[in-house]
């Protein structure tokens, strides 16, 4: 079986390519390299021993994308290509709606024209917004509080409606919580351009000396140590969740949604302390004012994925920090170094 992986050179997409390969599925990578390095191909080959097929292209170019679908002879699309910085989305909402929503609609039109009726979509726990209750299950009200989150909400609705309109179509929306970690080989990990948007790469870059201090935005939340609590999930567990969802539903039709998380939350201070233990250093931090839109606590109820897909997050907090530290020390400046 062959599948097209849009954004397959990125952090989650590349790890999912490994999980697909290990499951006997051939990933064809489609990426415009706007936020990824071509050297990821070399790293994937080091990990798997196989050179993955790569197509340079943008999903907004419908003719190019249709050609890729037809020539690759794929039966499904795993869709990771998107912008993903919450803060940037509040400053440039039109940019996000264009790149995430409009581009994906163009991609779906191309898929329909090529009779490709299966998609696994990279959604986000940001669709839930401020939690009404914890842990958050799939029945929680949808109320995103930033344009990035709303772009995911809009696309989930598009996929839901498409499945109703086309009885042959199957869509899986996987709502991630907070992906962290790296491949245990130390050859593949998160390498953000510029200033990281997420906590773990910021901690890792501080630990390796690229940054002076980790800023903790607020220490007066109603949590055990006053810092924000999130559900951090190892990227390899997340990648395996994609494969489990696809294999379970590959002969189905209709719209399916799942949370992918561990079901437990860690605070910012706990993450810093865990990483300090992995790196065997004291990581400096400072307390900064709360950021607009941040919430105190957020973690998943992943019971549905466990019961229906047989999928569980098995990696520990130590696995997350140890693997990230191994990657960061091997490539302190990312793959471009």
Image (tube, grey):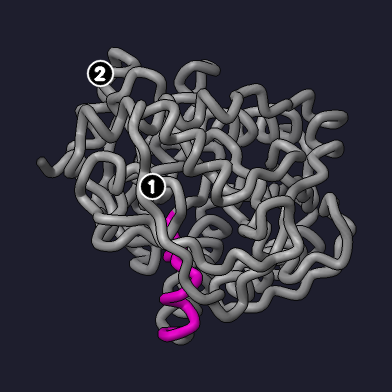
Badge 2, how many Cα within 10 Å: few under 14, some, many 20+? some
**Residue 23 in view:** yes
Helix, strand or loop at disc 1? Answer: helix
- According to the picture, the residue beneath numbered tag 2 turns out to be 46
Q: Please tell me in which quadrant of the rendered image residue 220 appears.
A: bottom right
Q: Nearer the viewer, residue 297 or 250?
A: 297
Q: Nearer the viewer, residue 194 or 66?
A: 194
Residue positioned 39% across, 37% down in the render: 14
Q: Earlier in the sequence, mark 1 or mark 2?
A: 2
Badge 1, how many Cα within 10 Å: few under 14, some, many 20+? many
Tell me which segment is drawn in magenta.
81-92
Helix, strand or loop at disc 2? Answer: helix
Q: Give the percent coordinates (x, y) of residue 290.
A: 56, 75
Circle count: 2
Q: Is residue 54 magenta?
A: no
Residue positioned 76% across, 58% down in the render: 163
Residue 203, numbered label: 1
Q: Is residue 105 above or below residue 19?
A: below
Q: Is residue 113 above or below residue 186?
A: below
Cα–Cα span, label 1 and label 2: 26 Å
């Amino acid at each position: 079986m062959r599948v097209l992986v849009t954004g397959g050179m990125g952090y989650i997409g590349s790890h999912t390519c490994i999980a697909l390969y290990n499951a006997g599925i051939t990933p064809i990578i489609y990426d415009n390299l706007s936020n990824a390095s071509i050297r990821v191909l070399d790293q994937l080959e080091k990990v798997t021993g196989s050179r993955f097929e790569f197509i340079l292209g943008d999903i907004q170019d419908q003719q190019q994308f249709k050609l890729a679908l037809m020539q690759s002879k794929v039966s499904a699309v795993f869709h990771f290509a998107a912008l993903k910085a919450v803060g940037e989305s509040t400053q440039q909402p039109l940019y996000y709606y264009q790149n995430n929503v409009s581009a994906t609609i163009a991609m779906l039109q191309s898929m329909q024209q090529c009779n490709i009726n299966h998609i696994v979509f990279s959604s986000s726990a940001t669709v839930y917004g401020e939690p009404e209750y914890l842990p958050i299950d799939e029945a929680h009200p949808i109320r995103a509080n930033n344009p990035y989150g709303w772009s995911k909400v809009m696309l989930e609705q598009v996929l839901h409606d498409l499945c109703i309109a086309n009885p042959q179509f199957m869509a899986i929306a996987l709502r991630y919580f907070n992906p962290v970690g790296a491949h245990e080989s130390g050859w593949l990990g998160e390498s953000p351009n510029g200033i990281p948007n997420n906590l773990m790469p910021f901690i890792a870059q501080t630990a390796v000396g690229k940054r002076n201090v980790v800023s903790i935005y607020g220490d007066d939340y109603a949590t055990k140590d006053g810092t924000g609590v999130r559900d951090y999930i190892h990227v390899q567990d997340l990648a395996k969740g994609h494969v489990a969802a696809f294999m379970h539903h590959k002969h189905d039709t209709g719209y399916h949604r799942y949370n992918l998380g561990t079901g437990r939350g860690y605070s910012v201070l706990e993450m810093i302390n865990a990483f300090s233990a992995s790196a065997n250093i004291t990581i400096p931090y400072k307390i900064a004012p709360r950021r607009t839109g941040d919430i105190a606590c957020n973690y998943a109820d992943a019971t549905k994925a466990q019961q229906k897909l047989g999928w569980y997050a098995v990696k520990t907090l130590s696995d997350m920090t140890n693997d990230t530290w191994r990657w960061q020390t091997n490539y302190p400046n990312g793959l471009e170094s």
